[in-house]
Image (cartoon, rainbow, N blue to C red):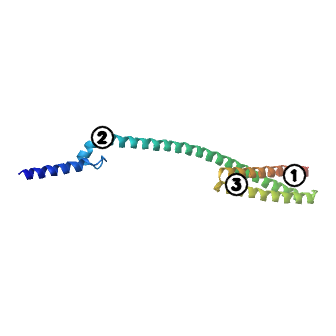
Amino acid sequence: MRRTIFILMLFAAVLLGGCAGQHDPRTGGFFGGVAGLSGGGYKDRVAEREARLEELRATQSELAAEKGQLESQKSAAQAQLDKDQALVRAMQIEITALEKKTKSLATKEGTDKQRVADMQKRVTDLKGKMNQQSSSLDDLEGSGLGDADMDLRRKQLEKQRDALRKEYDLLMKMQMELAQ
């Protein structure tokens, strides 16, 4: 009988010792849970998870701010591109009107044929350059260029547009002289 009690006590000690030996509150069973509550294992896990959650929230707010900044830059670049494209379209319409006027002047009697032919050639050249600039603006819109590359290309296109505008104004002036 003594032997049976000794075996039962030994079995209980092994059983209790095995349960309380786990330091991770998730895997310790009942006695591990009690040990986790009393030893602070649960509180440590909760504090660790809360700290990680705060880090993730801070990262999320930084990314949201950066996204907003990038969206505003994108919309400003798109607005500038739309403005440039509208200017090119308006100049193309004016060039077409100038071309029609030049052709009508060519049919008039008493006009210097050489000047009209020269003016028609210049109008045709100007029209080609405008079409080229329009396609360059379209390429710029869909390009994957970075901000610096896009700004440089846009400045080059603006300079070309200004030069074409000056030539257009000169042709208009010549047309007015021919019409008189």
Which circle, 2 or 3, is nearer the viewer? Answer: 2
Answer few, some or many: residues within 10 Å of disc 2's Cα (few below 14, many 20 plus, some between 14 and 19): some
Q: Is residue 116 above or below residue 86?
A: below
The structure residue drawn at horizontal position 79% and vertical position 54%, both measured from the top left corner, is 95
Disc 1 residue type (three-letter): Gln
Residue marked by disc 2: 39
Q: CA distance from mark 1 to mark 3?
A: 29 Å
Q: CA distance from mark 2 to mark 3?
A: 69 Å
Name the element at disc 2: helix
Q: Quadrant of residue 38?
A: top left
Q: Are the residues tagged 1 and 2 within 8 Å (C-beta)?
A: no
Label ID, residue 137? 3
Is tag 2's residue or tag 3's residue first in the polypeptide sequence?
2
Q: Earlier in the sequence, mark 1 or mark 3?
A: 3
Q: Position of residue 94 (x, y in %)?
A: 78, 51
| Image spot of residue 128 (x, y percent) | 78, 59
The residue mark sitting in front, 1 or 3, is: 3
Q: Using the rendered image of the protein, determine whether residue 54 is visible from the camera's viewpoint.
A: yes
